């Protein structure tokens, strides 16, 4: 499973995930990505076959529904509750998700809530 962490997550989380063998990248880790709209972040995730990890349900859920509706599909979306913002909480949850869904298409066109 390949992950793209939305801007509300520190790049440190992606570093920790990679140290555990999970292919993760963070918007926060690339200054050229920070100014991108949610739509462009979602498009990057689609192009790179990455599951979006975000707390931004309001913007990303409609983007996922739209991609599914027009037949493009998407690699998946993981929604994280705001209360899970320390690095430790989403880290352990995302590690478990990666163990439970090891294939690149395991969350295709699906959403998961943490």
Image: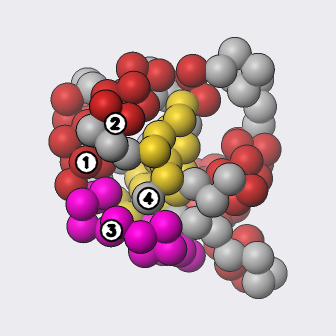
* Residue drawn at x 57%, y 22% as measured from the top left: 28
Let me know if residue 47 appears in the view: yes
Percent from the top left, x then y, of residue 77? 50, 60
Q: Earlier in the sequence, mark 1 or mark 3?
A: 1
Which residue carries the number 1 mark?
95
Identify the mark at residue 84; answer none if there is no mark: none
Which residue carries the number 2 mark?
17
> Quadrant of the rendered structure where residue 81 is?
top left
Q: Earlier in the sequence, mark 3 or mark 4?
A: 4
Tell me the SS state at disc 1: helix
Residue 113 vs 81, above or below: the answer is: below
Which residue carries the number 4 mark?
1
Tell me the SS state at disc 3: loop
Q: Can you say which quadrant of the picture contains the N terminus?
A: bottom left
Query: The magenta stretch spans which residues?
Result: 97-111
Q: Earlier in the sequence, mark 1 or mark 2?
A: 2
* Residue drawn at x 37%, y 45% as measured from the top left: 22
* Residue drawn at x 33%, y 43% as measured from the top left: 21
Q: Kindly report the distance in space between the C-alpha atoms of the residues bearing marks 1 and 3.
A: 10 Å
Q: Earlier in the sequence, mark 4 or mark 2?
A: 4
The answer to whether 57 appears left or right of 100 in the picture is right
Q: Kindly report the distance in space between the C-alpha atoms of the residues bearing marks 2 and 3.
A: 15 Å
């Amino acid at each position: 499973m390949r992950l793209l962490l939305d801007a509300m997550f520190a790049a440190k989380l992606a570093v920790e995930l990679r140290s555990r063998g999970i292919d993760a990248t963070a918007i926060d880790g690339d200054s050229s990505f920070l100014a991108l709209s949610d739509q462009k972040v979602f498009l990057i995730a689609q192009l790179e076959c990455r599951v979006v990890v975000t707390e931004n349900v309001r913007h990303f859920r409609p983007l996922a529904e739209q991609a599914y509706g027009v037949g493009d599909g998407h690699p998946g979306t993981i929604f994280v509750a705001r209360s899970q913002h320390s690095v430790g909480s989403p880290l352990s949850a995302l590690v478990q998700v990666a163990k439970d869904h090891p294939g690149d298409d395991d969350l295709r066109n699906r959403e998961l809530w943490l």
